[in-house]
Each structure stands twice: as C-alpha cells, then as structure tokens.
Amino acid sequence: MSNAEINQSVEHESNVLKRSLPTSAANHASLLQLAVAFLAGVCVLQLQTDIEVFRWSTYLSLFLLLLCATVFLVAPRWRNVAVFMAGFLWALFFAQSYLDKQLPEAFIGQDILIEGVIKDLPDYGARSVRFNFEVSRYIALNDQPINESMASLPTRLRLSWYYNKGRLHSGEHWRIKVRLKPPHGMMNPGGFDYEKWLYQQSIHATGYIRKGSSNQRIERAGLSIASIRESLLQQLSSLPDVRFQGLLKALTIGDKSTISAAQWQILQRTGTSHLMAISGLHIGLVATMVFFMMRWLVPGAICRYVSAPQVAAIVSIIAAGFYALLAGFSVPTQRAFIMLLVFMFAIIVKRPAFSLQTLAWALIGVLLVNPISVLSVGFWLSFTAVLIIIIVSSNRLKPPAGKFTGWLLGLRIQWLIALGMLPLSVVLFQQGSLVSPLANMLAIPLVGMIIVPLALLASLLNVVSAEASLWLFSQTSTILSLVWALLLWLADSPFASWQRSSVPLVISILAIMGALLLLLPKGIVIGYSGFILLLPIMLYQPPKPGLGEFWVDVLDVGQGLSVLVQTHNKTLLYDTGAKFSPRFDIGQRVIVPYLNYIGVSHLNYLLISHGDNDHAGGADAVMQMLDVEVLIAESEVFKQKSRLASRDKICEAGRRWEWDGVNFEILHPAGIYQKSNNRSCVLKISNANSGFLMAGDIERKAETQMLKLASTKIAADILLVPHHGSNTSSSPAWLEMINPQVAIVSAGYKNRFSHPTQKILQRYQQRGIEVINTAQAGMIQLKFGAVNEKPAIQVKQQRKVSTHYWNHRVR
C-alpha cells in the first residue's frame, strides 16, 4: 500500500470517528483533558504508601492551590499540569484532614469518657449493636480530665455495644465510656479492605462501650430524616415474608445489613448486585421516570416561560434528592446524586445530557466534593457505565421506527452496557456473570420502574397510614418474589458465572480498552481490534509452584487460623477461621474471596485441625462455595459438619502422602485427649530443602507426647506457633527440638487474650527465633524453593508490600 493510500485510509477513519462521536467531544476536548488530568492527580495521591513528606501546613497547601490556579489562568500551555497538581493537592488536603485526627497512642485501650451523637442507623446483631458516633467532647481519660484540643482527636467513631438491652436511635445525644483502637482490619489480597472502608466513611477509630453507670442518654432524638428512616426500617422488619425484608430495606433506605449470604451469592452469579444497593442506577431510574412523567404533565401556561424538559429536570432533581436522603446520603449516593445533578443541569441549560462534556463536568464535581471517591469500585463502575452509554449512543443504535422505539433503544443500550462491563467486572471482582446481560435486561425495568416506585410510595404512605404502608410494602414484596424467582432460575445455569484469577495491571488495562473499542460506532475498523486486546485476559494463567516447591499463605483471619498450601498441581487448606455470625463468616468473607483472587476453585484436601470455632467456624461456607475433594478432621468435627464421605479421612498420627515432590505427614494426635486443643491435627510439610510445621492449638501435654513419639520428625525451618502464642503452649523443650528460624503467629490485633503473650514472645526471642504476627504483618506468604534454590525460603508480609497511607502502622 502506498503512502497516499495509507494517508487516505487514516483520514477516512478520523472523519468517521469525528462524525460518530458527540459534538461535545470535538468542541470540548480540552475540558475532558482537564477532567482526566484532575482525576490523575487525585489518583496519584491515593497510590502513595506514606504522605508524611507531603504533609505541609494547611496554609502552604492553600498557597500551592492558588499557585496552580494562577498558572492555569496565565499559562495555557501548562494548564493540564496545573490541574494535575491541583488534583493531587486537593486529595492531599482531604487525606491530611483525616490523618490529623488519628487516635493518640496513649488513648489506645484506655477508658475514655466522651459525649456525642449517634449517626446513621444502628445495626443490631445477635450479641451487640453497632453504630457510628460523632464526638462533641472528650471528658476524661482513666478518670483524669482531658485538655487536648478536639482538632487533634478522633471525631467520628465506629462503636459496638455488647449485650445492650435498650434501643438506640439515630440523633440521640449520649455520654458513654469507651475503649478505642486505631482503624485496623484483616489484610489479605482480594479481600475486603476494612481500613479503606473506614477511611471512605471518615471514621477515625473503632471500639466498644464499657459497662458502667457513666453511660447515660443526655438528649432524645428529634424529628429528622434519620427518624423517618428508622420508622421505615421497623415497618419493613414487620413484613410477613421475611425472605425479602433485607432486599426491600436495601432498595428503600439503603440498609444492606440483613441481606443473607445466599442472596448475595445469587446476585453475584447473575451480575445484579447493583440492583440491591441504592446507587446511580436507582437514583437515575427514579429521576428518569419522574422526568418523563413531568414532561407530559407540565401545563401549557408554564411552557410560555420555560420548556417542559426544564421543569421536568428540576422536579426530577427534587425526587432524586428525596430518594438520596432516604438512603442516608451515603458516599455512593452522594456521588450518584452529584452526577445526576450535572446531567439534569445540562438539560436545564439546553445542552446534551449524555455527552463527553457533561461527563467531564460530572467527574470534576464528584472529585471536588469528595476526592476519596476514587477508592470506591462504584466510582469506576458508574463513570464507565455512563461512558459506555455515550459511546453506544453515538450513531451506533438505529432502532426500527415504531410504537416501542424508545423501549427497544433502552433494552439495546442496557444489553451493550452489560457486555461492556463484563471485562471490568472480571478485573475488579475476579468474577463475571455470563447471564448478566439477560438478567439485567429483564430485572432492571421491573426493579426500577415497578418495585422502587412502589417502595417509595409506601414510604410516603407511612406518614399518613402505617397500615396502608405495610399493605403496599407487602404487595411490593410479592412482586419482588417474582423477580427473585427469575434470578434464581438464571443463577442455576451452568454458564451463569465466569471465574478468573486476578490478572496483572497491564492485562486489565488491555481488557478494558478492548471492551470499549468493541463498542465504538460501526464503520471504525480499529474497533474490531478489541478482540485481540481481550485475548490476554482469556488466556492468562496464574503463577503456581514448580515441581518440588510449595507455597504457604498464612491468611490474616484475626483471632483464628487458616493456612493455604499449594504444590505444583495440588491444594490444601488447613483450618478455616471463625464464624462470628451469619453475617460475618471468615470462610465466606476472607478465605473464599482470596482463593478466587488467586484462581483456586478446587481443594484437594481440607484439613480441620480441631473443632474450635476459630479454626473450624468457616468450614461450612468453604465447603458450600468450593469443590472440596477430601476432608481430614477428627471425628468430632465430622459430627459438627454432618459429613463423612467414603473419601474423607480421620486425622491421626502416621498418615502421610506426597504431592509433586513435596511430603506431607500428620504427626499428631496419636492418642485420645479430653481437651479439644490437644486433639489438634499437627501437620508437617517438607521438600528437599526445608520444612514447615503447623501445630494447631496443642498445649504442653500434647507437646510432651510428640517429643516421645515423633521427636526425630518435628524439626522444621518455620513453625506456625501453637495456640496463637498462648502461655499454655510452646514449651522450652519442644522449641529446642523444633529449632525453627522463623515463627508465625496467627492472632487478632489487640485481642482480648493478649496473644501472643509477652512471656511466649520472650521465649522465642531468647532463642534467636524471628516472630512474625499476622496482626502486624497481614497475610504472610512463604515460598519454599526446590533443591539448591537460593534463598530456600522467601517470606512476604502483606502490610509491607501492599500498604497505603490510610493503613494502620502497627507499632
């Protein structure tokens, strides 16, 4: 092909692209560039592991922001750089405001008397009630007056009140005695980042309320939007069909706390989780419905001064604002409302609602109000969905003329959005629903156009008649049951879910670009190259140990234990952490998400060391959500789990096997023990280079027995400390025989047992044994190399390799 032909082809492609994209893309490209530059600056700040070097004074930060504004005005060529720096500084200002209110070290674990107001809806569990608390005054620390300024103390707390018999209400003013600790959560790849969530909610510390006469209600709550939400919560809790109470609470007032784990699993398999969380989708649907209703109802007399679309846009903003308030105006709801505000304002000033210019203004608006929004997955999903709408609406969709043209166009857009979001869902959640396009195409109109409006109408009726409101909520629940039956049918399809491991960043970017290219308007040849960009994510295989190697992941499960062992072709899970309640199961919340993250869907062996909850509580969830080939445990565990298949095995000393050049041997129990801790299954794993010993919760009696029966076998390079570092274990003679280089402790941060105890830590330190605690390190990964590989053992601590400035630094 000649140069002239190449130039002609390129010019043709360019002309097609210019004709197909919205006018705003050509006329306002600079605005989009500025929005992206501002977003980039905000994101760069969020990538920092530590911002101490940037923590200038507030006055200096404001001066630098003014300097960026000056450069923007007087130096057009440097505008993108100035806006990038402004985004960085704006995000830094918010980060500093949060970090300046860290809990002082002297306050951790001490009795503190405070006053303040209960915020949001209290969350009632089986043994406790949890709520957010806005502190107005710090009174005393260990009965001594506090003189420190409120400017340097935490003002928003997340508290638990155990065994409280009374009812708490949002808006109440209380004086309470609390014990606090810094925001701290479990840190595992692919798991829920509790510390990031607390940061997004501007919560500076967590804790619990101490018993005593100091706890007094000072002032009752008055009439407010919070009291209205509580009234609706009680109304929804009295619905006769308890199956859908949680779903209706989520759709009406944004309370997702009572949606069951099984229901979440159905929503994930069908790609409809967003349907049960008040977000941009619901607020947008409500606003759209009100907009079109008002557009036809506006009297002609008013249209002499303003157009019907302008009036409809104003009314839809009011309706969406009411819905956002009913949902508690949470962070995702705020973002959705700001986006809607910008799009409706474009209609009011007679500009295209869905254009790249409007999207740029919405992006800038959301970031100005809350730059921390970029840490939310919902932020990226929302803007990607709108971007897809803009792309697919630009001369691509030409529905046939007819009575149902609008509906057909809406369904086709929804279909393309679901397809376009599939790669992003796989990248973010390691799971994509293949039935999602069909599920959303059928469920969104039913939920958005029928169920949500009826729920809002029932909410309004509650002010006039509680009986009428309850009746309408019951009818809404019946309709929701029909939608749920449809989702259950789709979820049972063998093709419902596509599971993938986490993929490298480059492959993720290529996949997202590929999906967007495929959605470009027809006639653009480059769009078909999207298929090529999607190939890497389809073909990617996660790394795994070589022959003769094994990898060990000691998961951060708080006060409990769970360890994953991988060889070249086999996988073993040792213990499953605790189940604290139906809503907080370590197996479901931590272990399975991590296994999905690394691409493990099948366990060759699940070994439960003993029946204590902190070791076996999550087993049911693991066995329900994953394919478990063989269960190894003591007989009491089999009774608890109601499982004893022919392939399952009783844990007993002497059982051994070999996988991919790696040896496994159970060294204990070799007898009958009354205490469950001493019945713990002790497993040693070794290859030609190294050995790793997992001792469960055994105590001195079992350790002494092992010294008699297996003294020649227990030596190991790395030891999983028995019983989380309790005084009842790690006897001197036993440690001398094992002689490990490194000892791993699996314990909860500031746990009530004080594990590992100072006495045991000193015992290890006196022998020169390095101790690593999951409470301080997060998940600990050990890679045991093959013969002559250097180093023989690689150790990685999650809090060292994947930490951000908002994460708690454990001292």
Image (cartoon, grey):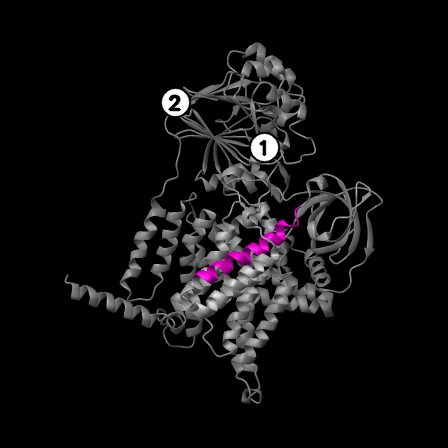
Q: Secondary structure at mark 2?
A: loop
Q: Is residue 582 above or below residue 545?
A: below
Which residue type carries mark 2? Gly
Outermost right residue:
213
Does 88 lie within the magenta span? yes
Q: Nearer the viewer, residue 68 or 340?
A: 68
Q: Position of residue 648 (x, y in %)?
A: 50, 27
Q: Position of residue 253 (x, y in %)?
A: 64, 60
Q: Which residues are magenta?
A: 81-102
State the separation of the CA atoms marked 1 and 2. 32 Å
Does 807 lie within the magenta span? no
| Point 61% across, 16% down: residue | 703
Whether residue 741 is visible, yes or no, is yes
Q: Nearer the viewer, residue 725 or 588?
A: 725
Q: Secondary structure at mark 1?
A: helix
Q: Position of residue 246 (x, y in %)?
A: 62, 54
Principal SS element in the magenta part? helix
Q: Which mark is residue 661?
A: 2
Q: Which of the 4 image quarters holds residue 436?
A: bottom left
Q: Is residue 775 left or right of residue 383?
A: right
**Mark closer to the chain start, 1 or 2:** 1
* Image quadrant where one finds the C terminus: top right
Q: Is residue 437 left or right of residue 103?
A: left
Which residue type carries mark 1? Lys
| Point 65% across, 63% down: residue | 326
Q: Position of residue 187 (x, y in %)?
A: 55, 40
Q: Is residue 624 above or below residue 693?
A: below
